Each structure stands twice: as structure tokens, then as C-alpha cells.
Amino acid sequence: MKPIRSFLFVPGSRESWLDRVASAGADALILDLEDSVPHDAKSAARALVARKIAGLAGAGQRVYVRINRSPFMYSMEDLLAVAVLGLEGIVLSKPNGPEDIDMASMMVAEAELRNGLAAGSIGLVPTLETARSIHFAHDIALRPRVTAIAVAAARNGDVARSVGFQWTRDGLESLPFKVAALVAARAAGKMPITGLWQEVHDIEGLKLAAAAHRRLGFVGEMLLHPSNVAPVNAIYSPSDEDVAYYSGMIEAFERAQADGRAAVIYDGEHIDYAHVKTAREIVEQARQFRAAS
């Protein structure tokens, strides 16, 4: 699956926002039925989001929906409404462990069956917001329907309350559990995603946080505001300098191969097959992102 650099939340009760949000340039949208929707607007938001999915997907937008959950289970009403052609996945808030993913997987399978969708067509993106879910991150990531693992560290959010950390701008307090979720996702072959930068107008702070996350190995960020999309897309995309560097590495290695060698010094560094495999992946990723823009 193509990485999601920018995963933008949109309140499912705000029709004007839903109509404009495709212009933000996010790799994927999360049409939210949960925390950003007032309790008395849940039913109307569900119907509105269900109506908007096909049009957004038809315009080339990748679409996810964050559904509601009670203390015991996720909302089957939400699932039956939004399981339509064009929906790429469901974002699951606050799973307590792998058993919640198993339950949600069965519910999504039932929604696919009832709504005439291909079995397995809807993926799951659990957001690890409890200490227990972080502890069981690898078991969660191994579930077949899971396509990505998201771990967030917002100030005063669910994770902060569950883990007990005190938020700082440099994020060192959240580094241990972010890395645990990252490694769990990578080990299972799933996308590791992080976030959320709540000071949405502090673009420089966002850039610093996103750049640190990218260096760790994350592929993208959950975002709260359209203005955050462009800087995050840029940070998680190979730069022109990156493409030039890795293209040159590939060319140097291919010349060495033509001379019967499997290693060469390039720009002062020893490179071999492993380095060139990485270089080819980065150049291909840059091509994909540019083709989509």
C-alpha cells in the first residue's frame, strides 16, 4: 500500500468542510464520527459522511472513517452506513488490545457482506491510545485486516491520561512508546503513523516534530488542520536533493556491476547491494508521490 504521509481529520458533521477538504492535498482523509461530532449530531453526521464517501473517492481521494465506540464495542450502525464503495478503511479509536481488533474485524466483515462489498476490501487503522494497546502493539499489528498502526501523543489526550506522561515540545517523554509502536508496525509489515500536533498554527513546531518522527521511521502524521498538510507532505517526501543523491548512487553501483564489482565508494561512502536497494525504494517513492501531485 502506498504510504500515507498526511492523514487529515475532518469533522463528519461539517458539510462545508467535507465539500472543501479535498483541495487540502492530504494523502488520505479521516471523516470523523467520533470526538469532533456533538452527541446530538451523531445520526446526522453518519448519514452525511455516508453520502460523501463515493464523491470524494471518485475524485481520487483516499477515504477513511473514524467510527464511534461504546465501552464495550464499536458502532455497528456507523459501520453499516459507511461501508460503501470508495471507503478504504476504518480508523478505530482506543482499542484496549488485540481482542478489540478481532471484534472490529468481524463487524467489518459483516458490514461488507450485508452491503455487497468484496470481502476484505476495508482495512483497519487502530490508534493506540491506551497503555494496554501500546503493550500489545505487535499482536494488534499482526491482525490481517490491519493496514497501519497509529500512535499519537497529544497534550492532555487519551494517551497522556493512560500512560501518565507530561507533554513537552521536544517529545522525549513519548519516544519510548512511539518507538515500540513503530517497531511493532514495521515487524508486521504495516504502516507506522503518528501525530497529533495540536498547536495547528505553529507550523515551525509541527515541522520539527514531523522531521523527528520521519527520522525515527514513521511514514506519516495524523493531522487536525488543512494548513498542516503541505509541510508534512514535504517532510515525508524525498527531496530533489535526495532523489539526485540516490539516483547517482544507483548509477555508480550499476557501473561497478558492469566491471564485475558488487561494492563501490560513492560520495565517500562504501555502498553495496543493501544500500542500492534502499536507494531504489526512495527513488520509486519519490516517483509515486510526484505522479499523484
Image (cartoon, grey):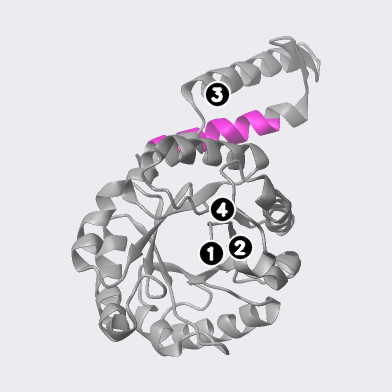
What residue is drawn where x is 61% and y is 46%?
218
Q: CA distance from mark 3 to mark 2?
A: 36 Å
Say left or right for 193 vs 132: left
Please name the amino acid that badge 1 sits on.
Gly
Q: Earlier in the sequence, mark 4 or mark 2?
A: 2
Please name the amino acid that badge 4 sits on.
Thr
Please name the amino acid that badge 3 sits on.
Asp
Q: CA distance from mark 3 to mark 1?
A: 36 Å
The dot on residue 116 is none
Residue tagged 3: 242
**Label 1: how many Cα within 10 Å (few below 14, some 14–19, many 20+):** few
For label 4, the SS is strand
Kindly check if marks 4 and 2 are in contact, taking CB atoms under 8 A apart as contact.
no
**Label 2: how many Cα within 10 Å (few below 14, some 14–19, many 20+):** many
The dot on residue 194 is 4
Of discs 4 and 1, which sits in the foreground? 1
Residue tagged 2: 160
What's the magenta region? 277-290
**Label 3: how many Cα within 10 Å (few below 14, some 14–19, many 20+):** some
Say which of 147 and 183 sits in front.
183
- The C terminus appears in which quarter of the rendering? top left
What residue is drawn where x is 69% and y is 77%?
98
**Label 4: how many Cα within 10 Å (few below 14, some 14–19, many 20+):** many
